[in-house]
Amino acid sequence: MTDTRLPHEKGFHISWDQIHRDSRALAWRLDGKGPDDGAWKAVVAITRGGMAPAMIAARELDIRTVDTISVKSYDHQDQSKAKVLKAPDAELMGDGTGILIIDDLVDSGKTLELVREMYPNAHFATVYAKPKGRPQVDTFITEVSQDTWIFFPWDMALQYVEPYRGTD
């Protein structure tokens, strides 16, 4: 049997409940792993996808200093060269020591590679990881295949979906 699905049709659908559970699991995995007697100095979310997981991790780990870094690496669904649109507070960041940088997903690794160059001593965590980007992440929860498209709840609307096999 030939698979006639388009690449984006091999989807991994994440609900709000699932991203919350997986983000909490990420926080638990990071608990006590910071360089300051196990504590983290701050959480930095890679916008936009990293904002929900970073907020959940900051809450679970009782981290009150939260900032963002905005990196653009996609135009619609085409990957392009990653570039920083907004950097976090330079005084806070230093070389990244004690900073927990969180994103929803590492795909090709280009975004994390760019941010890692800026903050080489930061700890990089994602909820989901694909094989190409996995070397760029220090901690993650779930690995999916490179050809899987992850549908996050903030990108979705409820609608009818055809059955996987057949239409009857």
Image: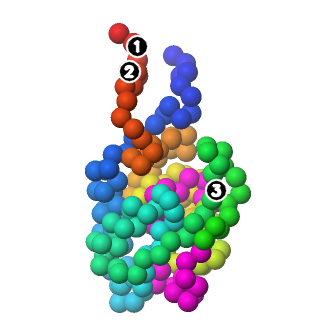
| Residue 73 circle label | 3
Horizontal and vertical percent for residue 17? 28, 50
| CA neighbours of label 3 inside 10 A, class few (<14), some (14 to 19), many (20+) | some
**Residue for point 63% across, 51% down:** 74
| Residue 163 circle label | 2
Horizontal and vertical percent for residue 119? 59, 78
Q: Nearer the viewer, mark 3 or mark 2?
A: 3
Q: Mark 1 or mark 3: which comes first in sequence?
A: 3
Marks 3 and 2 sit apart, C-alpha to C-alpha, by 33 Å
117, above or below 81, in the image: below
- Disc 1 is placed on an element classified as loop
Q: Which residue is mark 1?
A: 166
Q: Nearer the viewer, mark 1 or mark 3?
A: 3
Give the amino acid at mark 2: Pro
Question: CB atoms at circles 1 and 2 under 8 Å apart?
Answer: yes
Q: Would residue 138 be seen by someone viewing this image from the given angle? A: no
Residue 43 lies in magenta, yes or no?
Answer: no
Horizontal and vertical percent for residue 89? 55, 83
Image quadrant where one finds the C terminus: top left
**Residue for point 45% across, 45% down:** 155
- Disc 3 is placed on an element classified as strand
Q: Which residues are magenta?
A: 87-110
